[in-house]
Image: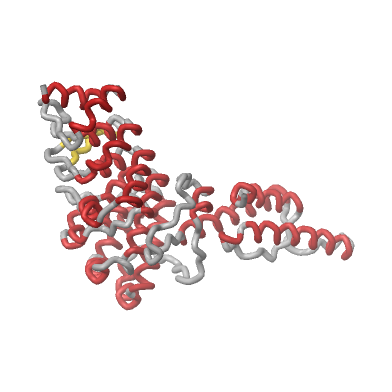
Amino acid sequence: MCFISKQKYFDSIINNQPLTFFKCHNKNIGQRERRAIPTQNFTGLFYAVYNNRIEFVKYLLPELEHKLISPFDLSVNNSIMKLAPNTTALHLAIILNRLEIVKIIIQYLESQATKRLESILAEPNDDLHSNIHYFVLSNSPEMQLLLFRLKFYPHKKEFENMKQNPILFAIKHQCPVVLEYILTLAKACPYKELMKETLTQRIQTVYQMLNEMLTDPQTNQEQLTLIRNLVVNFFYNKFPDIAQCCHKYLDEPIVREPSNDHPEIQYDVMKSFGFRASFAKCPLKDENSVKVVSKSCTSQICSNIKYCQNEQHSSENIIEEPMQDVTVQESNIETQNNNQRLDTIESQSESLSIQKRTIHLSNSAVNAIEQCLDVKGLVK
């Protein structure tokens, strides 16, 4: 009778039968699937995440501490990914890009998590894949930004055993968002000395990876540029002597950015440039936690502005100097009007810290920059 009830319970999640689920849920929470099927040993929460049953997940969050006890072959994007024992339901939700479910789990952790539960969820599985690895593999900037709301540091095991070092992993999979998060944590986590030791020992390995990616036709060169600058700036800011010595191993020189010249990019700005996360205005719980600074976003914005100006210049002749055949009075009036409009754009885009242009623009050129920045969309 117990087996029949448990079977109905798991089938109710699979088949989306809420009435049956709520009848069986209380006496079956924490139970595992015993039938000889591919999902054997799944808990109800694993079933709910796997089948994207958002409403069921809310009632199964107490099962978060339960992990897979046997391997599972997961189909993702027409390929098979093997999930190792000790994979968590949070891992599964991230790799399946269950964005709403991950948000629900994070909200639960923010309000009710214990140190014990946080420790359990921070641990990597038997393949040394942790939350960070699965955020990288999700290949979703919107999903990856949720990482900034987790309090988990990269687990110490990941740096003691270099098999799946999260820094090398983020570089290999061309993920600058997660890489920046990890590098920023290097000065905040309780075992930062171990991270520093790991980084300095592997600097040649990191540079070698960047060199190989530079000539790999499968590499997204825009992403690689962001990654290279993040890595080089990090080493020069944190370990200047080592960086100077090892810079010869990097094939292509990179112009380093000053460490203090970049503003903090707020989440609402990040949203407007492709990071469309709905939690944008939610701050980190711990005020001492690392701040989210996106130098790469600043560089990207400046590049977009320059590109917009160049395009406009070729079609509408941007005025770089006052025209000689126009009266001084008319030129001054036009220049004053344009400068006023530029001041308005710059004040609305204050969070982007874009330096005021000294170039005199025609009215149509100013409109082009307004469209490029979409200021009205950034400032409510």
Residue 185 left/right relative to 369: left
Please name the residue shown 30% across and 40% down the image. 93
Q: Residue at x 38, y 73 (%)?
A: 237
Residue at x 44%, y 56% (from the top left corner):
283
State the residue in front, 345 or 43: 43
Looking at the image, which is closer to me, 112 or 205?
112
In the image, residue 360 lies at what x, y percent? 73, 61
In terms of image quadrants, where is residue 15?
top left
Colour treatment of the image? secondary structure
In which image quadrant can residue 322 be found? bottom right
Whether residue 180 sits left or right of residue 263 in the image: it is left
User: Is residue 229 shown above or below 124?
Assistant: below
- Numbered circles on residues, count: 0
Residue drawn 50% across the image and 57% down it: 266
| Residue placed most toward the observer, 71 or 235 | 71
In this view of the protein, can residue 73 be seen by the observer? no
Q: Residue furthest bottom?
A: 241
Q: Is residue 113 visible?
A: yes
Q: Quadrant of the N terminus?
A: top left
x, y percent for residue 327: 89, 62
Task: Tell me residue 341's x, y (percent).
Answer: 73, 57
Give 257 or 314, whichever is nearer the viewer: 257
Check the image and report above or below for 229 versus 221. Answer: below
Locate residue 155 relative to residue 345 in the image: left or right: left
Q: Position of residue 235 (x, y in %)?
A: 34, 69
In the image: residue 339, left or right of residue 232 = right
